Image (cartoon, rainbow, N blue to C red):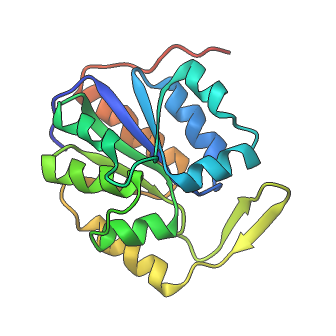
Amino acid sequence: MPPAGGERFAWAITGSGHELLESLAVAQRLPQVDLFLSGAAEEVLPMYGVQLDALRERFRVFRDKSCSAVPVGALYYEHYHTLVVAPATSNTVAKCAFGISDTLPTNMFAQAGKLGIPSLVYACDTEPVVLTRAPHDWVTLRPRRIEFDNVERLRAFEHCQVLCSVAQLEAALDARLRELALAWNPSSS
């Protein structure tokens, strides 16, 4: 992926709880990240113990509160060099794969693609069996053929890299940081 202009990462969060906390831990290690939350993300985050006020201590947070997804306009002003959608629900993947942009994350994805801004999408439903932590227990999911088909369709998009794990996401971000001559934030532990 070629470098794009801008100085910040745009990180879109959807309504998935699958490796949500692990994804946020990766985001916290990146320099200059803004979060873009779907309405579903706002519902799911507290279920996993994440409060908006806590996110605002580390990130600029944009919420899906307008019909026209007003925060997307920041992409046009070249504030962002990379879009990350993580974790991405099968619903978000399907919408992105078919060009539907009716939430803040899907709108960000569509506009980033049109502007040539590289996008990294961590799709949750990529394996025949997915063991995931729900808010109160662990559950086993078996994605359907349609989820796999949509992931494959999304892989064909220009300026888009689809990832299947937090480890793959971290490796892709590491490569992107090197392209941009940036570094991970020092560990806070």
Q: Position of residue 47 (x, y in %)?
A: 75, 49
Determine the residue positioned at 46% across, 84% down. Answer: 146
Q: Where is the C terminus found, in terms of image quarters?
A: top right
Does residue 16 sit above or below 108 in this rendering?
Answer: below
In this view, the residue farthest toward the bottom is: 145
Q: Quadrant of residue 71?
A: top left
For this orientation, the residue located farthest to the right is 136
Residue in the foreground of this view, choosing between 127 and 80: 80
Residue 72: which quarter of the image?
top left
Residue 50 coordinates in the image, percent (x, y): 70, 37
Answer with left or right where residue 77 lies relative to residue 171: left
Observer-nearest residue: 141 or 65?
A: 65
User: Which percent across, then down, holds residue 153?
Assistant: 30, 74
The x and y percentages for residue 48 are: 74, 45
Q: Residue at x 41, y 20 (%)?
A: 31
Residue at left 54%, top 47%? 166
Q: Is residue 28 left or right of residue 130?
A: left
Question: In the rendered view, would you say 44 is above or below 30?
Answer: below
Image-based side of 5 in relation to 44, left or right: left
Q: Quadrant of the N terminus?
A: top left
Quadrant hosting residue 169 = top left
Rendered residue at 24%/25% (across/down): 180
How many numbered marks does the figure carry?
Answer: 0
Relative vertical location of residue 107 with respect to residue 143 in this rendering, above or below:
above
